[in-house]
């Protein structure tokens, strides 16, 4: 295994053969997405985009017991402007993951909540286990899930996405798989081996054919629509500054 230097410990990037693994590495905070972690993800994606030699598949993973507990709003709770910036940066990172030329796999253990679930569905494939905790509780917090909505609609369809985002809450891994959030469901103790084996199988495909297919699929489903994706970030950023959203977040953080 080869470790790529990113000048940060918040995200690690390793390669093994033709598979690169980008790992969120903030396990004590359940890999919650701080501004610093998002910046670290951008650094890792830049390395991948610049052409890591021989990489044919990217796995997005999380260290510790959770994949990603969503945005670390507590860290910026007293600065709604900074919250808005975080939402915009997360939207940009999601867009970059979607547009990677190679197939992407989310390896999801434990929690994938809000923005974390967004990272899960932005990938081409996602592996989860029955005991995982998945979902989008944004409306429960007075937040609009506009950043994650475009890719959720592309994954499970507009009708099911509408019902899921308006209802809020979370669900178990089995229910998430049945709803289409996960493309694969395996026992927890097989999660790493199953996703790695699948990644190895994907490396056998013709690289030019895969690259062309991904670009065409992204064009067909609107993943190249910068205006739509940017608008989602602005909607979320504007709403999170409202008094209702701020009051709900203050109540949450006092628990």
Image (cartoon, rainbow, N blue to C red):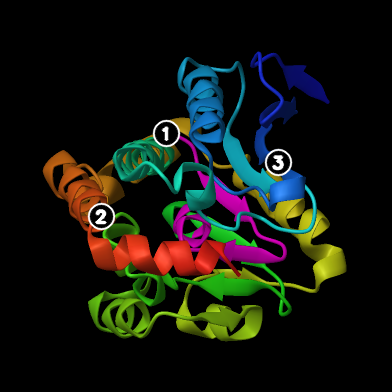
Q: Is residue 238 visible?
A: yes
Residue 18, horizontal then vertical, whole percent: 67, 30
Residue at position x 38%, y 35% from top? 96
Mark sitting earlier along the chain (1/2): 1
The quarter of the picture where residue 175 lies is bottom right
Q: Which residue is mark 3?
A: 26
Q: CA distance from mark 1 to mark 2?
A: 28 Å
Q: Are marks 1 and 2 in contact (CB under 8 Å)?
A: no
Element type where label 3 sits in the image: loop
Callout 1 secondary element: loop
> x and y percent of residue 85 in the render?
32, 37
Quickly name the residue at label 1.
101
**Which range is magenta?**
102-120
Q: Which mark is residue 236?
A: 2
* Rendering coords of residue 53 (x, y %): 60, 16
Residue located at (53% from left, 23% from top): 48
User: Which quarter of the image is occupied by the C terminus?
Assistant: bottom right
Judged left or right of residue 39, residue 95 is left
């Amino acid at each position: 295994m080869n470790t790529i230097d990113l000048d940060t410990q918040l995200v690690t990037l390793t390669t093994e053969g033709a598979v690169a693994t980008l790992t969120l590495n903030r396990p004590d905070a359940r890999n919650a997405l701080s501004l610093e972690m998002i910046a670290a993800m951008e650094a890792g994606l830049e390395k991948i985009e610049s052409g890591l030699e021989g990489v044919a598949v990217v796995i997005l993973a999380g260290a510790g017991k959770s994949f990603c507990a969503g945005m670390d709003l507590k860290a910026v709770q007293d600065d709604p402007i900074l919250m808005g910036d975080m939402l915009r940066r997360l939207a940009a990172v999601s867009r970059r993951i979607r547009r990677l030329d190679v197939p992407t796999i989310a390896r999801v253990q434990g929690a994938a909540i809000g923005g974390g679930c967004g990272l899960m569905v932005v990938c081409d494939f996602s592996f989860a286990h029955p005991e995982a905790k998945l979902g989008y509780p944004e409306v429960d917090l007075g937040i609009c899930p506009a950043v994650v909505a475009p890719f959720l609609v592309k994954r499970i369809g507009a009708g099911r996405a509408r019902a899921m985002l308006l209802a809020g809450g979370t669900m178990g891994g089995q229910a998430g798989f049945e709803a289409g959030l996960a493309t694969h469901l395996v026992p927890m103790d097989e999660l790493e081996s199953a996703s790695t084996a699948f990644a190895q199988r994907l490396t056998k495909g013709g690289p030019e054919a895969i690259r062309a297919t991904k670009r065409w699929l992204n064009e067909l489903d609107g993943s190249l629509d910068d205006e739509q994706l940017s608008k989602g970030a602005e909607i979320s950023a504007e709403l999170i500054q409202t008094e209702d959203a701020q009051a709900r977040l203050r109540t949450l953080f006092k628990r």
